[in-house]
Image: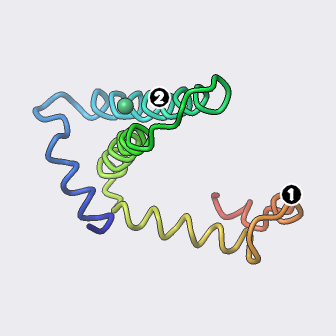
């Protein structure tokens, strides 16, 4: 499945009905932050509290983040694959030889809305 196909499939369980754009974007942004928090909290327990990593649980929580991300993008008519392409292009410009501290401090793309 490619990213745009995922975005389309994910929309099957998106909020339906005439509840208003502000209501939906608010719901999805809270969901995105909440699910991101679930990933962070879970990894906190794994890294700092001695919990054993459950790969399946981590994959499902990351999927929840992806679902909300895809639906926020969809509300603004942005194909998920475009977000991925733009992010890779930005990172290739910022870190042409892979991540390093010098390039991170220099941030050549700072004036490119990045
Ligand atoms: Mg979750």
View extreme (left): residue? 17
Please tell me in which quadrant of the rendered image residue 63 appears.
top left
Q: Quadrant of the N terminus?
A: bottom left
Instruction: Using the image as rendered, state which of residue 24 and residue 11 is in the foreground.
Output: 11
Percent across and percent down for residue 78 are: 35, 59
Label 2 neighbour load within 10 Å: few <14, some 14-19, many 20+: some
The single residue placed furthest to the bottom in the displayed view is 97
Neighbours of disc 1 within 10 Å: few (<14), some (14-19), many (20+): few
Residue 38, which numbered label?
2
Looking at the rendering, the quadrant in which ligand 1 lies is top left
Apparent side of residue 34 relative to residue 97 in the rendered image (left or right): left
The label shown at residue 90 is none
Residue with the mark numbered 1: 105
Per the image, label 1 sits on a secondary structure element best described as helix
Q: Residue at x 82, y 64 (%)?
A: 100
The foreground one among 29 and 6 is 6
On the image, the x and y values in percent for residue 80 come to 36, 60
Residue 73 vs 2, above or below: the answer is above
């Amino acid at each position: 499945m490619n990213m745009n196909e995922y975005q389309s499939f994910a929309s099957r369980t998106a909020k339906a009905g005439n509840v208003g754009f502000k209501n939906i974007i608010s719901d999805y942004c809270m969901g995105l932050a909440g699910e991101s928090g679930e990933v962070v909290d879970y990894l906190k327990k794994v890294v700092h509290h001695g919990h054993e990593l459950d790969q399946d649980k981590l994959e499902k929580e990351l999927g929840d983040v992806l679902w909300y991300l895809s639906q926020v993008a969809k509300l603004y008519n942005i194909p998920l694959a475009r977000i991925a392409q733009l992010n890779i292009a930005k990172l290739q410009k910022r870190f042409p030889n892979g991540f390093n501290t010098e390039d991170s401090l220099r941030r050549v793309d700072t004036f490119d809305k990045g």
